[in-house]
Image (cartoon, rainbow, N blue to C red):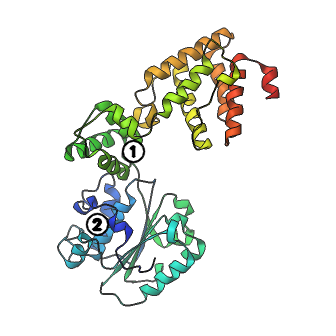
């Protein structure tokens, strides 16, 4: 980071936030109201920590608050006026007095000390705002370098720390800041909001495709904006397009694996080929995901709410039902209950022993042995 006051990468990521305000930001009314009160009271010397899952909207809220803090004539409602020199500097993507630091890239002690040194130099801005992204990844040395500035009373510098996991932010930093937790939208609000965003972009969407996008974005506003940008060029979004765009083709491969394993034909072990992805852990997660989804079907329970499901399995009811019927038939042939057989598979696959490709291959082999109840062969596997 050669010049901490130059145009920052953060300011160039997107511009949609410029049309928002603290009063209109989605899903974070309580936090936005508290930040507007800080602006109205000119109470900026105490830093804040915005924490929550990735994509939940931390950076957007930080930008809106930073713009209001730096505004020369904030409104009585605690919003940026959008017309003063400072507000215009945001529009031009050259915000005066605004600094962005990503701790995953520049969270070292050297960069932090350089920043502190530059903060001691005069600025044309009456105030300075320092936004530290991924503050929970900041090194101890870097955090210690920032602490002195962070704790100065009546400081002309406002710190905004963004973190996914609050517990991983230094306690000394937490104690010197106001803490605000940002949560995703609930399912219904996410659905209504996402559909409205698509409509505003001139894009219609199949309702089943919308279900998948709602599950994929998980009520995280930042992810919802990204999804809208991804489909903005389309006039109509289909379920097939969304699945392809999100890389959900693995479902066919993994369900084929389980179909082969549960088949009454009992193919030889070498025919039970596990669909290996580039990442062994991700392969394991996907195989586990389908197995976990089978349990409610085996029990005859209703489907898990769409919003809480693995997005790739939304509207895959027929596939899951077919696999559960195969599992039930296999269990009957072994004089076992479907749940008993499912538990045996779960003991095998929900362990943490398959983190590499050799482990996955052995798990694939052991799966057939569990289903055929070849206990002796399983013991030697």
Q: Nearer the viewer, mark 2 or mark 1?
A: 1
Q: Secondary structure at mark 2?
A: helix
* Residue 335 percent coordinates (x, y): 68, 9
Work out how far the residue at label 2 is from the one at label 1, CA to CA, in angstroms: 27 Å
Q: Is residue 122 above or below residue 54?
A: below
Q: Is residue 59 above or below residue 80?
A: above
* Residue 34 percent coordinates (x, y): 33, 64
Is residue 12 shown left or right of residue 312?
left
Q: Quadrant of residue 161?
A: bottom left
Residue in the image at 19% along x and 77% along y: 84
Q: Quadrant of residue 299?
A: top right
List the residue tagged with mark 1.
217
Farthest front residue in view: 270
Is residue 278 shown left or right of residue 31?
right
Q: Which quarter of the figure is the C terminus placed in?
A: top right
Q: Please report whichever mark, 2 or 1, sits nearer to the chain's N-terminal start.
A: 2
Residue in the image at 53% along x and 19% along y: 323
């Amino acid at each position: 980071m050669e010049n901490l006051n130059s145009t920052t990468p953060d300011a160039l990521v997107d511009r949609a936030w410029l049309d928002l305000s603290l009063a209109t930001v989605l899903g974070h009314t309580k936090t936005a109201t508290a930040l507007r009160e800080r602006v109205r009271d000119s109470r900026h010397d105490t830093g804040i920590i915005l924490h929550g899952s990735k994509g939940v909207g931390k950076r957007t809220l930080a930008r809106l608050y930073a713009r209001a803090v730096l505004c020369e004539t904030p409104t009585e409602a605690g919003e940026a006026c959008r017309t003063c020199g400072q507000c215009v500097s945001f529009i031009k993507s050259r915000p005066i007095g605004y600094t962005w630091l990503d701790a995953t890239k520049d969270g070292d002690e050297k960069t932090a000390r350089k920043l502190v040194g530059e903060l001691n130099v005069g600025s044309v801005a009456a105030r300075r705002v320092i936004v530290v992204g991924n503050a929970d990844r900041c090194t101890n040395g870097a955090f210690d370098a920032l602490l002195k500035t962070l704790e100065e009373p009546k400081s002309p510098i406002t710190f905004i720390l963004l973190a996914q996991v609050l517990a991983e932010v230094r306690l000394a930093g937490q104690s010197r800041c106001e803490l605000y937790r940002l949560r995703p939208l609930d399912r219904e609000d996410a659905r209504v909001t996402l559909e409205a965003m698509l409509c505003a972009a001139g894009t219609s969407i199949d309702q089943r495709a919308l279900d998948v996008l709602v599950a994929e974005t998980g009520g995280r506003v930042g992810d919802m904006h990204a999804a809208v940008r991804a489909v903005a060029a389309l006039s109509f979004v289909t379920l097939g397009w969304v699945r392809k765009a999100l890389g959900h083709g693995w479902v066919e491969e993994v369900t084929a694996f389980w179909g082969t394993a549960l088949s009454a034909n009992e193919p030889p072990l070498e025919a039970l080929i596990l669909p290996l992805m580039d990442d062994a852990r991700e392969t394991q997660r996907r195989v586990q995901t389908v197995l976990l989804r089978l349990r409610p079907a085996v029990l005859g329970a209703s489907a898990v709410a769409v919003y809480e499901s693995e997005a790739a399995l939304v509207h895959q009811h027929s596939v899951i039902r077919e696999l559960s019927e195969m599992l039930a038939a296999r269990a009957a042939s072994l004089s076992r209950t479907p749940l008993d057989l499912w538990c045996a598979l779960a003991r095998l696959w929900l362990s943490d022993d398959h983190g590499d490709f050799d482990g996955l291959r052995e798990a694939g082999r052991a799966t057939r042995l569990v289903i055929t109840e070849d206990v002796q062969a399983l013991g030697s596997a």
